[in-house]
Structure formats: structure tokens, C-alpha cells
Image: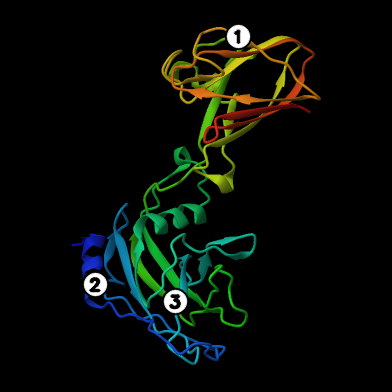
Amino acid sequence: MKKIFSFALMLLGGMAALTSCDSDIDSNPTIKAPTTFTINASPLAEQYIQLAAGNNVNLTWSQPDYGYNAYATYKVQVGLVDGNGAVTWNTKDGAPKFLTTPYYECNANISGEEISEALCELDGFKYAEDYVDQGFREVALRIYSSINTSMNAEVEGTGIMSENYVTFKHMAAYNAIKSPAYIYLVGNCTDWNTPNAGNADFYSTWRLFEKDDEIGSNVFYGTFDLPAGDLQFRFYKALTGWDDDSMGPQEADSGVDSEFTNNTFEGTILTGKKKGTWLFSGFAGGTVSMVVDLNQGTVKFVIN
């Protein structure tokens, strides 16, 4: 019978094996360029493991020989093993892409959520709605070590990838895709169609998105071809109807006279049942790029 292990068990095992790799050292040590280091085998490598948010995979390894007991930074790279034993590692722009969390000891409880995120990237899933369960597969993990400055810059000659990698023969990801968030542009340019779930397909082309490398930033970008005439609009966080998620320049449901200066308008935005609209009378028509920063409460519209 297959057994699916909770990562809580791994966490307990990891705590028992905890060994610190850092200690006080004499000032200004001579750093030796390391040539190799290895990861230890996991006792759960052959088990059926279902990744889950909030749980962990434990790994331990030897410290590279830096010539002293260095305070090193360790990063984790995830790969998928094919039927022939070849590993496809997660990369970005041709360079290794590591999990978000760094580690500073030779023992790490690695986030199951972060591993799942990496596996979703390897599978090519960009948006949560694209996800398809891939079942249990062989997953590889390896470690990159370096000594970093106080500004987190890698000291030249100290970076090294582990000479081996470890695999978990039967590991399953879940839908951990972090997609760019988005908001909606609603106005006379959208014929004031009701911003509700029934109009989701219509409003799919009237969205402003976070940038792919700025997920969670709460800053949204969009470019729209808008018709000539009086231009009037506001924004919505979600398609929940006219009231709850509306965002505009004021609370009252009326237009605020606005104008472009040198093809640019900059102003403020209020959130939460704010149904005011920006009103650009006599807009000549054309392509407008928009930036909505909900952290600062600002907007910027530029006629291209």
C-alpha cells in the first residue's frame, strides 16, 4: 500500500538532525575556494510524498571547505527527473533559479509550497487556472553555496553547486502558482457593462496586471486603445457588482474633470466603494498607458 507522508514528519526528523554550520571565527579569515560538497541522502527518498502549503522537506549537507567554519548562504534548486534519469532544472534566463528562501545552516526544512511553485514553473503553468495535476513524479533537489557580503553580494570564488543531488522518487506538487494580480477598467469605453461575474469574458481584455517579476506589488499596468469623445472611467478590484470593489478619485458617483498635460495625467485614487470617475472631456482618441499604484494611492495615464 502506498503511504503518503505529511511533511510534519519530515520537520520532526529535521529537528533531530539539526547541526549548525556557523560559529564565531577570527576576524579577516583567509577564504579558500571550495571544490566540492555533498548533500546527504534522505530517509524518505522512496516514499510517496504529497507536497502541501505550510509543510517542509528536510535536507542536510556538508559545508564546502572554505578554510574555516564559514557563515555561508545556501540556496535550493528544484528539478524534474525524466524516465531516462536526466534532470531538467528550474532556470530563468539560462541561469539557475533558486527557491525564494535562503538558508544559513547545513540543515534546512524546505518549504513544500516553494517546491510546488518551482514544479509548476517547470511544467509551464503560468496562471492558476492553467494548472493540471501531474501526479507523483521523481523530483531532484540540489544546493548552491556561497559566502556573501553584508550587502548580500556573493564573494568572488566562493560560489559552488553541490556535486550531487538528491531525489524523491514519488513527490506530487499542488496548485501553488502565484499569478500576477489584476484590476479592471470600467467606464464608457466598456459601455458601462456591469462589472459582475457574468461579464468576466468581456472584461478579460480590460484588465491591468502586476508585472510578472512584481507579483504582490499592488502596482498595475495596462495599455488600452480608447475611442474619441468624452472619456470617463473608474477601476474595480473584482467583478462583484457596482459598489463594493470600486476605486476612483472620489467617493461620490460623479465625474471629476481631468485633463492631460503634455499627454500625461497624474492623480490620486481611493479604494473601497469609491465610485467617482475621471472625466476627460473631448478626448481625441488613441492608445493610453495606465499605471495604478494602490500602495501609494496614485494613478498615471499617458497618451502614447
The residue to which callout 2 is attached is: 15
Q: Is residue 213 above or below residue 72?
A: above
Toward the left, the furthest residue is: 1
Query: Which residue lies at the image location 44% right of the left edge and 53% below the top edge?
Result: 117
Amino acid at circle 1: Gly
Q: Which residue is mark 1?
A: 255
Front position in the image: 242 or 199: 242
Which of the 4 image quadrants contains residue 54?
A: bottom left
Image location of residue 2, percent across then percent down: 22, 62
Q: Secondary structure at mark 3?
A: loop
Q: Tag count in the figure?
A: 3
**Residue at 50% of width from left, 17% of height from top?**
199
Question: Looking at the rendering, which quadrant does residue 282 occupy?
Answer: top right
Looking at the image, which residue is at 58% across and 13% down? 277
Tell me the CA gap for discs 1 and 3: 61 Å
- Nearer to us of marks 1 and 3 is 1
Taking the spot 18% from the left edge, 62% from the top edge, the residue there is 1
Q: Horizontal and vertical percent for residue 281?
A: 72, 8
Can residue 172 be seen from the camera position used here? Answer: no
Q: Label 1 crowding class (10 Å Cα cut-off): few <14, some 14-19, many 20+?
A: some
Q: Is residue 265 left or right of residue 148?
A: right
User: Could you give the CA–CA distance between mark 3 and mark 2, rounded to whole angstroms?
Assistant: 21 Å
Q: Amino acid at mark 3?
A: Tyr
Q: Is residue 81 left or right of residue 18?
A: right
Residue type (three-letter) at the residue carrying disc 2? Met
